[in-house]
Image: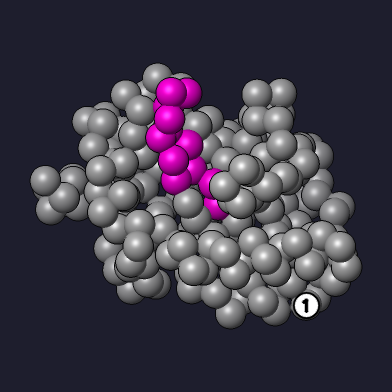
């Protein structure tokens, strides 16, 4: 099972690919929802992580965000890059047990010999507004976090730029520099509502 669309049935990637060139926007139905637990929380009762993806960024938006990221990497102008990110279409949401969640502003997916993977940029940065929740608070001034997920059996392994560096792939996409040696942030499984699964058939 390699797909992100519906993990239990292996249907996610086909739907996601069909939608790859047309974002569903903030008001569309979710392509899929994943739910699991983060590892670094102080209180196990606050470990829940939930991710709902509405759509994939268009190629034009991916390129624009990647170009702006290169400027940001050189300037470290956190405020300017944050303003830019807020102007981008929302492709989904990531929630922890905190009162406020994170919006997904950059989203792409790929399936290759190593299986399916998904790369997202979320804002605000993970842990930044809730340092009390975490054993290792985020003290980086970056206004975002990059999140990469890869399949491991029936689970999606989530790793983030909190524990790893960001690099550009040969295709120009943003990704974690060394996914395999980056600590896990969370593991998630399919939590897509049954009525959405039926409508995707």
Most common SS among magenta residues: strand
Q: Residue at x 62, y 43 (%)?
A: 170
Whether residue 149 is visible to the viewer of this picture, yes or no, is yes
Residue at 48 percent across and 51 percent down: it is 108
**Magenta-colored stretch includes residue 113:** yes
**Is residue 48 toward the left or the right of residue 138 in the image?**
left
Q: Residue at x 26, y 54 (%)?
A: 18
Q: Is residue 10 left or right of residue 158?
A: left
Residue 112 pos. (x, y %): 43, 30
Pick the front one: 114 or 133 = 114
Residue range (magenta): 109-120
Q: Position of residue 116 (x, y in %)?
A: 42, 33
Residue 79 sits above or below residue 18 on the image: below
Pick whichever, 62 or 197, lies toward us.
62
Q: Residue furthest top?
A: 153
Q: Quadrant of the N terminus?
A: top left
| Residue 91 on image: x %, y % | 45, 63
- Image point (47%, 37%), residue name: 117
Residue 94 x/y as whole percent: 52, 54
Which sits in the foreground, 11 or 175? 175
Which residue was labeled with disc 1? 80
């Amino acid at each position: 099972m390699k797909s992100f669309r519906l993990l239990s049935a292996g249907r996610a990637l086909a739907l996601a690919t069909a939608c790859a060139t047309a974002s569903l926007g903030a008001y569309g139905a979710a392509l899929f929802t994943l739910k699991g637990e983060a590892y670094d929380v102080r209180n196990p009762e606050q470990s829940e992580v939930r991710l709902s993806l509405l759509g994939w960024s268009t190629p034009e938006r991916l390129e624009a965000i990647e170009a702006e990221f290169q400027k940001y990497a050189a300037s470290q102008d956190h405020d300017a890059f944050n303003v830019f990110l807020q102007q981008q279409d929302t492709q989904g949401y990531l929630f922890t047990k905190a009162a406020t969640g994170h919006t997904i502003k950059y989203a792409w997916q790929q399936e290759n010999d190593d299986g399916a993977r998904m790369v997202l940029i979320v804002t605000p940065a993970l842990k930044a507004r809730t340092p009390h929740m975490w054993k290792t608070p985020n003290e980086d001034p970056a206004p975002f976090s990059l999140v990469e997920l890869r399949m491991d059996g029936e689970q999606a392994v989530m790793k983030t730029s909190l524990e790893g560096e960001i690099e550009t792939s040969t295709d120009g996409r943003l990704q974690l520099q060394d996914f395999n040696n980056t600590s896990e942030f969370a593991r998630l499984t399919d939590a897509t509502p049954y009525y959405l699964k039926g409508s995707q058939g």
